[in-house]
Image (spheres, helix red, strand yellow):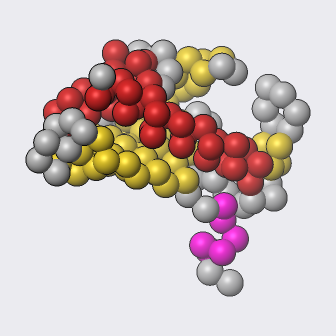
Amino acid sequence: MSKHSSETPDICKTTVIHADIEKVWEAAATSKGIETWFMPNNFTPQAGAEFTLHTPFGPTPCKVLELEAPYKLVFAWGEDGWTVSFELKDLGNKTEFTLIHSGWGKPEDIVPGPGPDQTNEEIRNRMDGGWDSLVNEKLRKAVEE
């Protein structure tokens, strides 16, 4: 059995935003920008920098793993092995934005949390919908309006 078949699938969201890459990068890779569509934070755009996302469940430690302005930001989110990537592709006066949330582990593994314990699959499926509205509605609105 391949490793892929036993792991919970990544969340992947791609959208085309009607704004140039610099404007989208500003929203995706600055503390103020991230706060407008995602969560309050003290993000620093520097590889290796540690920062905190202020989630509805409390502060969550994060760390910048990769930063390649204005094309890619990768950070570790929390202590569950999650990795979040923002990848931007310059399309002239538009930008393709792709979010990848990976590192889920096995679907049936239980993840203790602030509420009732849930499986990786349950959390992943709930967050899949959350990322959908964040990327396709909130990020788009923050950059296009």
Q: Image point 13% across, 42% down: which residue?
A: 93
- Along the line of sight, the residue nearer the viewer: 112 or 26: 26
Instruction: Locate residue 23: give its quadrant.
Output: top left
In the image, the segment drawn in magenta is 3-8
Residue 5 is a magenta residue: yes
Seen from the viewer's position, the closer of residues 27 and 47 is 27
Magenta stretch holds residue 135 = no
Q: What residue is drawn where x is 58% and y is 34%? A: 78
Of 136 and 47, which appears nearest the observer?
136
Tag count: 0
The answer to whether any part of residue 25 appears in the image is: no
Left or right of residue 28: residue 52: right
> What's the magenta bit mostly, secondary-structure-wise?
helix
Q: Residue furthest right?
A: 116
Question: Relative to 31, does residue 10 appear above or below in the rendering?
Answer: below
Residue 26 image-quadrant placement: top left
- The residue that appears at 25% across and 39% down in the rendered structure is 18
* Residue 76 seen: yes
Q: Residue furthest bottom?
A: 1
Above or below, 117 relative to 5: above
Q: Give whichever of 115, 75 is nearer the camera.
A: 115
Estimate the x, y position of residue 85 in percent, counting from the top left. 40, 46
| x, y percent for residue 13 | 46, 51
Task: Tell me if residue 31 comes above or below residue 111 in the rendering.
Answer: above
Question: Residue reaching furthest left?
Answer: 92
Q: Quadrant of the N terminus?
A: bottom right
Quadrant hosting residue 47: top left
Q: Is residue 18 left or right of residue 123?
A: left
- Seen at 40% across and 52% down, the residue is 14
**Residue 20, horizontal then vertical, whole percent:** 16, 37
x%, y% of residue 107? Answer: 75, 59
Q: Look at the image and tell me in which quarter the C terminus lies.
A: top left
